[in-house]
Image (tube, rainbow, N blue to C red):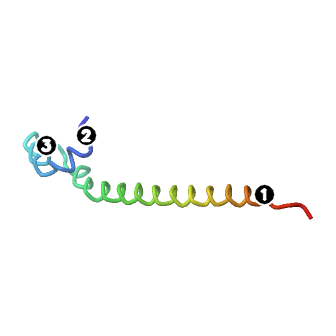
Amino acid sequence: MLDMKFVREHYDEIKLKLNKRGEDLADFDKFPVLDGKRRELIKETETLKSKRNDVSQEIAKKKKEKKKMPMI
């Protein structure tokens, strides 16, 4: 199996070699679109994880502040 990065960087060469072998390229032609979508989703996931971590830290901070408040 080829590495995704390698396929991305050498897409035209790989496509040419597969074509010479007589392989059906219908699915391979979808690679650039699907790879782009995959990369967008990974980026979105990482952004959401970062937001989740920020909110978790804020919650922990609020809980800590609440414990430090003197009882009246």
Disc 3 vs disc 1: Cβ atoms closer than 8 Å?
no
Task: Return the x and y of residue 52 as percentages of the image width and height.
Answer: 57, 57
Q: Is residue 54 left or right of residue 65?
A: left
Q: Position of residue 51 (x, y in %)?
A: 54, 61
Q: Residue at x 26, y 34 (%)?
A: 1
Residue type, mark 1 in image = Lys
Total tally of numbered discs in the picture = 3
- Amino acid type indicated by mark 3: Leu
- Where 7 falls versus 48 (above or below)? above
Q: Which residue is mark 3?
A: 18
First along the sequence among labels 3 and 1: 3
Taking the view exactly as shown, the residue that stands out farthest to the right is 72
Say which label, 2 or 3, has the lower sequence index.
Answer: 2
Of discs 3 and 1, which sits in the foreground?
1
Q: CA distance from mark 1 to mark 2?
A: 53 Å
Question: Which residue is tagged 1?
Answer: 68
Residue 13 pos. (x, y %) = 10, 47
N-terminal of the two: label 1 or label 2? Answer: 2
Tell me the residue at 36%/55% (across/down): 38
Mark 1: secondary structure = helix
| Amino acid at dot 2 | Asp
Extreme left residue here?
Answer: 20
- Residue nearest the observer in this picture, 54 or 20: 54
Q: Residues within 10 Å of mark 1 (few under 14, many from 20)?
A: few
Question: Which quarter of the figure has residue 56?
Answer: bottom right
Foreground mark, 1 or 2, reads: 1
Q: 52 and 17: which one is in front?
A: 52
In the picture of the structure, the residue carrying the numbered disc 2 is 3
> Looking at this view, is 6 or 71 the one in front?
71
| Horizontal relation, residue 44 to residue 57: left or right | left
Check residue 38 in the rendering and tell me which mark sits there, or answer none: none
Please tell me which residue is depicted at 16% across the width and 50% down the height of the picture.
11
